[in-house]
Amino acid sequence: MKRIAPTLYFIVIVLLPILSVAQEDYVLREGDPDGIGKWYMQREIARVMDASAMDWLERPERSREENTALLMMNLRIRPDDTIADIGAGSGYHVFRMAPRATNGHVYAVDIQDEMLQAIKEKQENGDVTNVSTVKGTEKSVNLPENSVDKILMVDVYHEFSFPKEMMASIQKALRPNGKIYLIEYREEDPYVPIKKLHKMSEEQAVAEMEAAGFQLLRNINNLPWQHCMIFVKERF
């Protein structure tokens, strides 16, 4: 009987099972034109909004449509909080949080250079000293372990190409008593004027967050169009 070469043995016995498990996390198939043809936990992942839509992020009516002032109140920002805005975009929320975290810090995390540049320009023009930009990747927020008290994700989680990996990196970055504020357009409400793939139901969000090791603390149901779901690390 011919012996299997050590390298081939390693590939067959060790690597293939690992790759098989990894592939099971995501399913590739055709879907919505607004999606990327990739599914996670029976949800199709939406296309990323690129920098060409920056004007929409900064639209004057946004504060009224989404009641961003009320969202800031929901965050209950303390002066010494360290906060990370994941998928910060043009910095719309970053520069609303920074004045509240007077002795703290705000990390503006995004994967697009154009978005990060827009934030840097705002920071320089406003002489804001407690904001830092961070270039993330599709799989990591690139923040130090146990470094942040609050994570804010506004209408961005549903666009993560690798949600499992991203949430694992967030899990590491968040301090033990930290909180995730997951803001997503309500799929349950047909009157919210947003494309279906850019909405999430509370049920779907909870299922995905639980799979990542988080539990729902509260859904503050006071925003006009969006869920404001607060998640904490599960206690084992």
Image: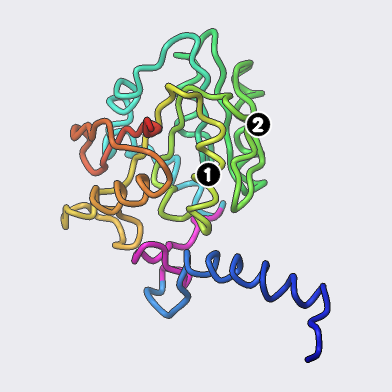
Q: Which residues are magenta?
A: 34-50
The furthest residue to the front: 1
Give the labeled residue for mark 2: 120
Quadrant of residue 198 in the image? bottom left
Quarter that holds the N terminus: bottom right
Secondary structure beneath dot 2 equals: helix
Mark 1 or mark 2, which is nearer the start of the sequence?
Answer: 2
Q: Residue at x 37, y 37 (%)?
A: 60
Q: Of residues 97 and 78, which is closer to you in this image?
A: 78
How many circles with numbers are drawn on the protein?
2
Q: Of residues 38 and 87, which is closer to you in this image?
A: 38
Using the image, tell me which numbered label, if any, was put on residue 149. none
Tell me the crowding category of disc 2: few under 14, some 14 to 19, or many 20 or more residues within 10 angstroms, Cα based: some
Asked if the magenta segment contains residue 38, the reply would be yes
Q: Residue at x 30, y 20 (%)?
A: 73
Side of 156 relative to 229 (left or right): right
Pinpoint residue 84: horizontal percent, then vertical percent.
Answer: 52, 30
Q: Of residues 213 and 138, which is closer to you in this image?
A: 213
Q: Residue at x 40, y 16 (%)?
A: 77
Give the labeled residue for mark 1: 168
Pinpoint residue 86: horizontal percent, then vertical percent.
Answer: 51, 39
Asked if the magenta segment contains residue 29, the reply would be no
Quadrant of residue 2 in the image? bottom right
Pinpoint residue 42: horizontal percent, then vertical percent.
Answer: 34, 66
What's the image's color scheme? Answer: rainbow
Q: Mark 2 or mark 1, which is nearer to you?
A: 1
Pinpoint residue 118: horizontal percent, then vertical percent.
Answer: 61, 38
